[in-house]
Amino acid sequence: MKILYSFILSMLILGPSCLAQREIIDKVVATIGGELVLLSEVEEQHALMEAQSGVLPADARCNIMDQLMASKLLVNQAKLDSIEISDEEVEAQLDARIERILGFMNNDVTQFETYYGQTINEVKAQFREDLKSQILADRMRSQVMASVTVTPSEVKQFFSSIPLDSLPYFNSEVEVGEIVYKPEVNKEERQKTIEKLESIRQRIIDGEDFAELAAKYSDDGSARAGGDLGWAKRGKYVPEFEAAAFKLEKEEISPVVESEFGFHLIQMLERRGNSIHVRHILIKPELTDADLEKAKAHLDSVRQLLTTDSLTFSQAVKLYSNEDVQSYNNDGRMVNPATGNTFFEIGDLDPDIYFTIDTMEIGAISQPFQFRDQVGDVYFRIVKLQSRTKPHKANLKQDYSKIQKAAIESKKSEYISNWIKDKVEATYIDIDALYSACPVLDKWKVKDIRP
């Protein structure tokens, strides 16, 4: 798990890792215009990759240096082009990444600070400049690539260039439509929850500790931290929660607030302009068996309308499916997060969907079935098997979108390589002799151009 946290912090987020354990006598190993590559950066990336993958090839450090130099060249050009990144954007991305790590730690701030040996603010300060450089590089790369597209004829040409014996085989894939419905809690349970929170609120007003009551009663992951949600900028929370939170004065406790997650008590700890530090107690009202049966019956009636052709699946999605589900704006078609398209290999599907569609014919609609989302909330869904392909060798008719994606990635790779080559010719570059035996770095060795 320790490696996981470092991986998220360094690879997904910030660049130089907290992972390296051995002492490194640091020095500059490459200069690209006004940007520097440090030995510690190379070694830390190497240590991280080694921890993730085990034994690395002998030229791993050469490849790491190549990647770092490309990133520094992008940053150097971004600065020359006066691309600006606001402090607010950097802070927002820092917060998002820290929160992702906290999510793996069940939002336990104490565990986070014990693990890193620093407070959250100290960790953010350590990585703020690295993140800004990463954002600059990404922004520059996006700007360079913005004009890269492929025409249908280029897709066809790309496909034709692949040797027949190198064409990939694709497993069977399916497209699945869904209509999702969230059961409604009955009035009695809602009222019980409101009254419970009102009682807790009064106990806090009478002198009991908010954090202790949050730890005891809250249904949110932040309960372990006494309900503490840390600092957040305006726009982070759902509207109902945010509107109530921003109205509060320091130490003030809100009345009971309802959001899509349940019912809350919110306490303002501190506010700085458009940033707030709050804690909360969340209680989710319990669904009764009657609530669940009512939701299932509701979707069953929708299914009856579909099977009698009283309305199309797309129409039913707009009328009956939850609007906050991703498929709602895609005519009910589920989107594969790994590919961004609507096709799933069987192994990519949730087991409940896989077992439901396993014996279905194309166009068939399932009975309603229950599932839980990532935070444990109960939903019901019906699914429609939209299409199913057989295992096959890649071809333009069935796999155009995949081939198009590969074609554009190939074109982008060639484009950025040529861009780097052009910029290298006009940029002062110096590489330490430590990497003189790296063939991959030959493209960086050009005539001496002084800054």
Image (cartoon, grey):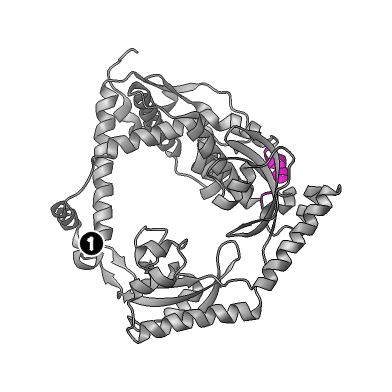
Helix, strand or loop for the magenta stretch, by majority? helix
Label 1 neighbourhood size at 10 Å, few (<14), some (14-19), many (20+)? some
Indicate the position of residue 7 as horizontal and vertical percent values: 55, 45
Residue name at image x 55 percent, y 50 percent:
239
Quadrant of res 428: top left
Disc 1, SS: helix
Residue lying furthest top in this view?
Answer: 450
Question: In terms of depth relative to the viewer, which is nearer, 284 or 389?
Answer: 284
Q: Amino acid at mark 1?
A: Tyr
Q: Position of residue 322 (x, y in %)?
A: 47, 66
Q: Is residue 289 left or right of residue 39?
A: right
Question: What residue sits right under mark 1 in the picture?
Answer: 400
Q: Is residue 57 above or below residue 395?
A: above
What's drawn in magenta, residue-wise? 107-116
Residue at image position (50%, 35%) is 15
Q: Position of residue 196 (x, y in %)?
A: 76, 62
As for residue 1 lying within the magenta part, the answer is: no
Say if residue 228 shows up in the picture: no
Task: Residue at the far right: name it.
Answer: 207
